[in-house]
Image (tube, helix red, strand yellow):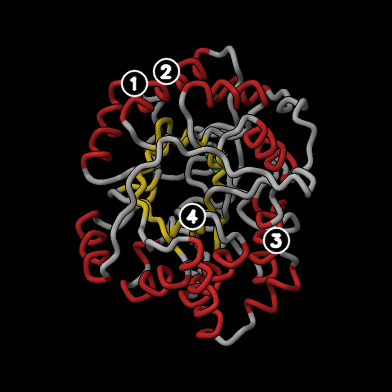
Amino acid sequence: MTLSELQALYDLPFFTLLSRAHAVHEASFPDGKIQLCTLLSIKTGGCSEDCAYCSQSARYKTELESHVLLEREEVMLHARAAKDSGSTRFCMGAAWRGVRGGTERFEQVLDIVRDVATLNMEVCVTLGELGPAEAQQLRDAGVTAYNHNLDTSPEHYPNIVTSHTYEDRLRTIRNVQDAGIAVCCGGILGISETITDRLRLLEVISNFNPAPESVPINSLMPMPGTPLAENPQVEPLDLVRMIACARIAVPSAKVRLSAGRTRLSDETQTLCFFAGANSIFYGEKLLTTDNPEAADDRALLAKLGLDTLMPDTSLGAPVADPSLPASPAFPASIPPPACAAVAACC
Ligand code: SF4
């Protein structure tokens, strides 16, 4: 979709936008089920990057407790618990700029992925920048999806992150697509962006070829010590509009209602589900931020009569439209830039 098309959608009367989005949602996901996902931080804090919203950056004085890469056994305990509680997707995040093939840490991550892949769950990782070889190794180990958010528009991104570029992010997404891994790519609301920035993000994502398999929409959870610590809460109805636009812009993708749910009422979440959100992160923690109690989520879904999805471990990446060029358009052969910080932090 183009920015002007997205703007026209966004400006519709609220209920008109919601009913259009819901019609798209019903056509794409007729069973109306919600996917429960669990996200575990497998390596926390000490990150070389300067993302202004993130408590894991080593550049800000936050109260976060850092830890090195978890042992496989510990990750498996969390993964089994997530499965037992009903999650069908287990996502693992590491606070690094990126990973490099041949390093001990990357080999450890591959071992973790191989173990988790035995649990009959979808396996997603978010490890920062990837080259084509690393993407292929992750796929071979059993990764079904790779999360790499673009956060916001290309224009606003340098106000939020200066230690790497939007193009770096797009290059990793290209490498993930080329490895045949499903891409999970979305953004964060509440990081001092305009509505146009939000819609520009959707414009970029909606033109990916192949399309992303999922689009997480996060609301900033302001973290003490970070530059965005005092940012105001996202207006709930603006979040609902964004979910509706994402549903229409990327009809085949799961739209994941992600960080910030602790600040949403049941009624706002209900509107988000109606507008097209069909996945939540489930469990007490979302990387390093608080998340609603699992029992509360269960109760809300039961009240709404929403069933949960079974795992799809055969999940393949969406197929590209052969009549359109691949997007984002980067030669897959470009490796991630050499960076001393990468070696230092991973
Ligand atoms: S790269 Fe990831 S972990 Fe590191 S500061 Fe940015 S968001 Fe946080």
Q: Where residue 88 sits: x, y (%)?
A: 33, 43
Q: Distance between the residues labelled 2 and 3?
A: 36 Å
The residue sitting at 66% across, 45% down in the picture is 210
Few, some or many residues within 10 Å of mark 2 (<14, 14–19, 20+): some
Q: Where residue 144 sits: x, y (%)?
A: 48, 34
Q: Which of 344 and 126 is in front in this view?
A: 126
- What element does badge 1 sit on? helix
Disc 2 residue type (three-letter) = Asp
- What element does badge 4 sit on? strand
Disc 3 residue type (three-letter) = Glu
Disc 4 residue type (three-letter) = Lys
Where does label 2 land, which residue?
111
Where does label 4 land, which residue?
254
Q: Distance between the residues labelled 4 and 1?
A: 29 Å
- What element does badge 3 sit on? helix
- In the rendered image, which quarter contains the N terminus? bottom right
Mark 1, ligand 1, within 8 Å: the answer is no
Mark 2, ligand 1, within 8 Å: the answer is no
Cβ–Cβ below 8 Å for labels 1 and 2?
yes
Q: Residue 72 carries which label?
A: 1
Cβ–Cβ below 8 Å for labels 2 and 3?
no
Where does label 3 land, which residue?
203
User: Is 332 left or right of 134, judged from the image as shown?
Assistant: right
Q: Earlier in the sequence, mark 4 or mark 1?
A: 1
Cβ–Cβ below 8 Å for labels 4 and 1?
no
Q: Which of 259 and 274 is in front in this view?
A: 274
The residue sitting at 67% across, 22% down in the picture is 340
